[in-house]
Amino acid sequence: MIESIMLLFKRILNPLPSLAMDDGGTHHTGMKELLVYGVSGIASLFIFGYCVHIFVGGMVSEQTELLLIIVVVVISAAVTGWLIWDALKRAR
């Protein structure tokens, strides 16, 4: 499944392979993938943090809510980072 998602991203970001080559014939898809993964990763971290606020906001103290947001965002950042690293490693 990850391979099919990667192939979809490659087709979206690089519809014409000849346009993505410089004079040496090197593809620049790694930077495009990193940009897409970075933007989606940052957006998902904000969403995860806000979801925690939605679920526990008002039911617990503000310190507890902040601690829960930090824990969820750190865990999701680690998982997202690992997924990005794995996808880039498999693409090479």
Image (tube, grey):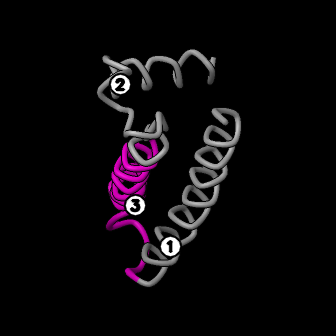
Is residue 67 on the magenta stretch? no
Q: Name the residue at 39% across, 66% down.
A: 59
Amino acid type at circle 1 is Ile
32 left or right of 64?
A: left
- Give the residue pinned by disc 2: 14
Is residue 38 on the magenta stretch? yes
Residue 65 higher or lower than 51, as above or below: below
Q: In which quarter of the image is residue 29?
A: top left
For label 1, the crowd category at 10 Å Cα-Cα, with few meaning under 14, some 14 to 19 and many 20 or more, is some
Q: What stretch is highlighted in magenta?
A: 33-62
Does label 2 or label 3 sit earlier along the sequence? 2
For label 2, the crowd category at 10 Å Cα-Cα, with few meaning under 14, some 14 to 19 and many 20 or more, is some
Comparing 82 with 92, the one in front is 92
Q: Which mark is residue 58?
A: none
Q: What element carries label 3?
A: helix
Quadrant of the frame with the C terminus: top right
- Give the residue pinned by disc 1: 70
Q: Name the residue at 52% across, 69% down.
A: 68
Label 1 vs label 2, nearer the camera: 2
Disc 1 and disc 3: Cα gap in Å? 8 Å
Quadrant of the frame with the N terminus: top right
Amino acid type at circle 2 is Asn
Comparing 34 with 22, the one in front is 22
Secondary structure character of the magenta stretch overall: helix
Q: Name the residue at 29% across, 27% down.
A: 19
Q: In which quarter of the image is residue 61?
A: bottom left
- Give the residue pinned by disc 3: 49
Does label 1 or label 2 sit earlier along the sequence? 2
- Percent across and percent down for residue 35 are 37, 49
